[in-house]
C-alpha cells in the first residue's frame, strides 16, 4: 500500500475520533469539562501528528521527484524542481516509475 495513502487513512481515522468525541459530549456521556481536559492533553499530540504528516508528505514528494529526474541531477536541481516546477504525484505507486508532468504554457 502507498505510504501516503496509509498516512491519509490514519488522518481520516483521527478525524473520525474527533467526531466521536463531539458525539459523546452531545449525548451527555462526556461533560464539557472532561472533553476540554482530553482536548488540552491531546493538543500537543495533534500538533506533533500534523507536523509528522507534513514531513512525511514533503519527503515523499522529494523522493518521487528525485526518481523522475534525469541521471546526474544535483540536489540543487532537485530543490529547484520542487519549488519552481511541476512534481510527480506523491501518490505514485511504489511499483510504477514516477513521471514529471509536462509544464503548462
Image (tube, grey):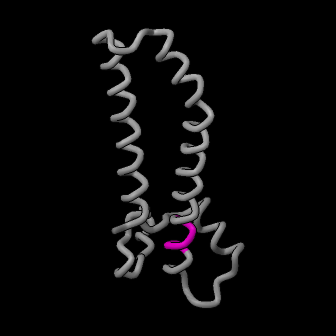
Where residue 86 appears, x then y in whole percent? 49, 64
User: Residue 4 versus residue 65: which sits nearer the camera?
Assistant: 4
Residue drawn at x 39%, y 76% is 94
In magenta segment, residue 59? no
Q: The N terminus is located in which quarter?
A: bottom left
Where residue 97 appears, x then y in whole percent? 39, 81
Residue 36 in the image: above or below residue 1: above
In the shown orientation, is residue 30 left or right of residue 52? left
Picture quadrant of residue 79: bottom right
User: Residue 53 versus residue 69: which sits nearer the camera?
Assistant: 53
User: Residue 98 versus residue 81: which sits nearer the camera?
Assistant: 98
Residue drawn at x 60%, y 46% is 51
The furthest residue to the bottom = 71
Picture quadrant of residue 37: top right
In the shown orientation, is residue 2 left or right of residue 72? left
Give the main secondary structure, helix, strand or loop, of the magenta stretch.
helix
The furthest residue to the left = 27
Q: The C terminus is located in which quarter?
A: bottom left
Residue drawn at x 49%, y 79% is 68
Residue drawn at x 35%, y 81% is 95
User: Residue 51 versus residue 32: which sits nearer the camera?
Assistant: 32
Q: Point out the stretch of residues depicted in magenta.
A: 61-65
Amino acid at each position: 500500500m502507498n505510504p501516503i495513502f496509509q498516512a491519509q487513512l490514519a488522518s481520516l481515522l483521527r478525524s473520525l475520533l474527533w467526531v466521536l468525541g463531539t458525539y459523546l459530549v452531545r449525548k451527555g456521556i462526556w461533560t464539557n469539562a472532561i472533553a476540554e481536559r482530553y482536548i488540552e492533553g491531546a493538543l500537543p499530540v495533534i500538533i506533533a501528528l500534523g507536523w509528522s504528516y507534513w514531513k512525511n508528505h514533503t519527503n515523499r514528494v522529494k523522493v518521487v521527484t528525485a526518481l523522475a529526474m534525469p541521471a546526474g541531477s544535483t540536489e540543487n536541481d532537485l530543490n529547484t524542481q520542487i519549488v519552481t516546477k511541476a512534481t510527480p504525484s506523491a501518490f505514485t505507486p511504489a511499483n510504477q516509475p514516477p513521471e514529471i508532468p509536462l509544464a503548462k504554457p
